[in-house]
Amino acid sequence: MDIKELTQRIIEGGSITREEALELVEAPLEELCSGADELRRHFNGDVFDMCAIMSVKGGRCSENCKFCAQSSCSKADIDTFEVRDADYVAADAKAHSGKGIAHYCQVSSGRRLNKSEVAQICENVKRIVAETDMAPCISLGLIDKEDLLALKAAGVQRVHNNIETSPEYFKKVCSTHTTDEKIEYMKLVHEVGLELCSGGIFGIGETWSDRIDMAFALVEIQPDSVPINMLKPIKGTPMEDRDRLSKDEVRRIIAIFKYILPKASIRFAAGRDYLDDTGIACFKGGSNATITGNMLTVKGISIEEDLQTIERLGYSLYRKEPKIYRQI
């Protein structure tokens, strides 16, 4: 495998095959990461995209994803609360505003929110638009077209829903919904004219073949942002005894995903805090985005530390003006 030749082909508008992607699993790591960083510079420039998230509804979920602390099959100790009101969300959002964070995402547990809960999220979104400099995003499960249009009218710009892993392996970690349901939802997100954020979680027992299949499934739905999460085993979940992935394996995952999805922002999310460099090597190997601050049920990296890292690496911060859409 000639990595330089492959890199140039993608820069010139070509693409990578599944067979070539599998070959990258054995490619020299430093050369692979260098090529991925070249792709990042070509397609994304030196712009870094930070996102902050908040749990807007917490508690035991109806779905049985084995890797999640809020899952119906989890025994982990978690907080339970109903959808946060606009004052609560606005106060949290304003605490993150003015720091260079481009996106602010409200995330809920559960398969989907009901209509009154969606209406509350819409009010929250309007406050974020009016009182902060961040673009509102949502991650609310498998909501319907009517809900998506209402959220878009309120000011939502991007919708998150992870594909998680390969369609085949997903059947082994969740039986209450399918990859096909997720993909149909993501097509709906595109249909109503919203941006899409979709990635997955690694270290849950998947093979390299699963990882490659997941990436090519994402190629079909073309997300703008691809979150890369590393499992942090939580006591009480079915995956509490799994080993964490090594730093080199994390770097390789991110680099290969950049080759398969070169135009997307590869967003290194959960798992950065257990690496000795908090992800810096990955930000020099194909990733130009992250979730800053704490995750939903696990610790993250502080905004201040991330800002120092981004400046030290020579990135500039991505900024996006929030806007109100008209109802379709």
Image: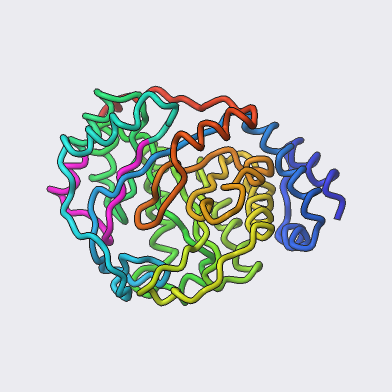
- Residue 85 x/y as whole percent: 15, 41
Q: Residue at x 26, y 68 (%)?
A: 62
Q: Residue at x 30, y 44 (%)?
A: 106
Q: Residue at x 36, y 43 (%)?
A: 53
Looking at the image, which residue sits at the far left?
Answer: 116
- Residue 270 x/y as whole percent: 48, 53
Q: Is 292 situated left or right of 322 in this image?
A: right
In the rendered image, the vertical position of residue 179 relative to residue 276, given as above or below: below
In the rendered image, the vertical position of residue 319 relative to residue 109, given as above or below: above
Q: Is 84 situated left or right of 201 in this image?
A: left
| Residue 152, quarter of the rendered image | top left
* Viewer-side residue, 209 vs 88: 88
- Residue 2 x/y as whole percent: 87, 51
Magenta segment boundaries in residue numbering: 104-121
Q: Is 25 situated left or right of 148 in this image?
A: right
- Residue 304 x/y as whole percent: 46, 34
* Viewer-side residue, 219 vs 265: 265
Classify the position of the N terminus by image quarter. Answer: bottom right
In the rendered image, the vertical position of residue 237 relative to residue 325, given as above or below: below
Q: Residue at x 60, y 64 (%)?
A: 245
